[in-house]
């Protein structure tokens, strides 16, 4: 099989409004794809549709297959299984993924033991704790044994995003969706989390759908990009081509704006 995710003619509507229109793209195993576009262009809704998390008010037409399984209209148990094995998602705001009242160790332990049970192994006690610590180390969290026992509000925003990444990795997904994973973080932490994601995706051979309106960030992590405007894909191709010599006027505007911002920053130095 050469595609892991295959989106064909995806159209999302609500109350007579079309939010995403006839979108098609595929992601091969291990491939890193960026989805870019201004605010409101339909990036997050596309991510939600792919992971079977669309709000009830939004109607999906077309087809989304993940490892050969149709996602649109699939029953909850099928979606649960896909989210445990094929796909995991990291959101912009890590607190969305974390339960404020539960210690970090337990939050990572739940998807971890679920995955082991699925593989026919029962993991508990010391063995489970040691795997959780291993994951906290993998996302380069300092002092993992303290963080294991901490609540989400006892650690920093950047650390919370690393925990959310560790939770996603606990499922060993074949495709990781990262929806503006660094937007809520300060610039230095953004760069660190980005570097971490890049390294982990390569090390674990996961495919990545990286969603962002920040072009330089996308250019640094994605091999291929899709440009969305008002729910429609206006341009797609290798990141090095689309972001360096954009063909569509909309992409040209985005690239110009990113360059102007960059120039303004370097001019101020
Ligand atoms: N639950 C919903 N019900 C109705 N409309 C929605 C819903 N969620 C999103 N929309 C609309 O769908 C469009 C696309 O939203 P989406 O969140 O996918 O944009 P986005 O590209 O991810 O933007 P941002 O970069 O700001 O996160 C927007 O016009 C938004 O108002």
Image: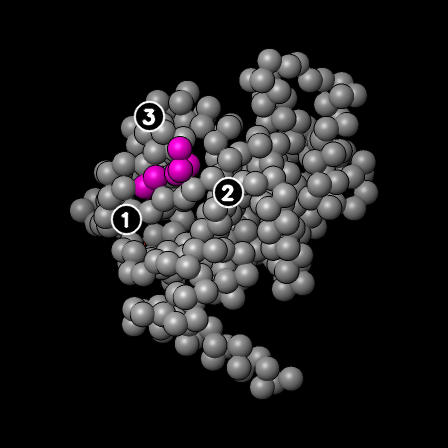
Element under disc 1? strand
Span shown in magenta: 1-7
Which residue bears the numbered disc 1? 23
Residues at marks 3 and 2, CA–CA distance in whole angstroms: 25 Å
Residue at the image point whose x is 59% and y is 46% from the top = 202
Percent across and percent down for residue 97 are: 55, 39
Residues at marks 3 and 1, CA–CA distance in whole angstroms: 19 Å
In which quadrant will I find the N terminus?
top left
Residue at the image point whose x is 63% and y is 64% from the top = 187
Question: Between 204 and 145, which is closer to the camera in this rendering?
Answer: 204
User: How many marks overall?
Assistant: 3
Percent across and percent down for residue 158 are: 66, 52
Element under disc 3? loop
How crowded is the residue under tag 1: few (<14 C-alpha within 10 Å), some, or many (20+)? some
One can see residue 2 in this view? yes
Q: Left of 1 or right of it: where is 214?
A: right
User: Which tag, 1 or 2, sits closer to the chain's start?
Assistant: 1
**Residue extending farthest front:** 1
**Residue extending farthest left:** 16
Residue 74 image label: 3
In which quadrant will I find the C terminus?
bottom right
């Amino acid at each position: 099989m050469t595609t892991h995710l295959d989106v064909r003619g995806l159209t999302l509507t609500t109350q007579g409004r079309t939010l995403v229109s006839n979108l098609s793209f595929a992601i091969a195993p291990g491939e890193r794809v960026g989805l870019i576009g201004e605010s409101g262009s339909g990036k997050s809704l596309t991510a939600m549709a792919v992971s079977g998390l669309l709000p009830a008010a939004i109607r999906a037409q077309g087809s989304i297959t993940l490892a050969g399984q149709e996602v649109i209209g699939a029953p909850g148990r099928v979606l649960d299984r896909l989210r445990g094995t094929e796909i995991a998602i990291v959101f912009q705001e890590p607190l969305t993924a974390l339960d404020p009242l539960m210690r970090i160790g337990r939050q990572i332990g739940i998807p971890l033991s679920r995955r082991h049970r699925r593989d026919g192994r029962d993991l508990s006690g010391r063995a489970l704790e040691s795997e959780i610590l291993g994951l906290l180390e993998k996302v380069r969290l300092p002092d993992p044994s303290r963080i294991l026992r901490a609540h989400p509000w006892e650690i920093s925003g950047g650390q919370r995003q690393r925990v959310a990444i560790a939770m996603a990795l606990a499922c060993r997904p074949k495709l990781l969706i990262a929806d503006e994973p660094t937007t809520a973080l300060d610039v230095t932490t953004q760069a660190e989390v980005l570097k971490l994601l890049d390294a982990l995706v390569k090390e674990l051979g996961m495919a990545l759908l990286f969603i962002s309106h920040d072009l330089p960030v996308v250019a640094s992590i994605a091999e291929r990009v899709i440009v969305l405007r008002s729910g429609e894909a206006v341009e797609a191709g290798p990141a090095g081509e689309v972001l360096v010599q954009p063909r569509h006027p909309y992409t040209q505007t985005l690239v110009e704006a990113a360059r102007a911002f960059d120039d303004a920053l370097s001019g101020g130095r």
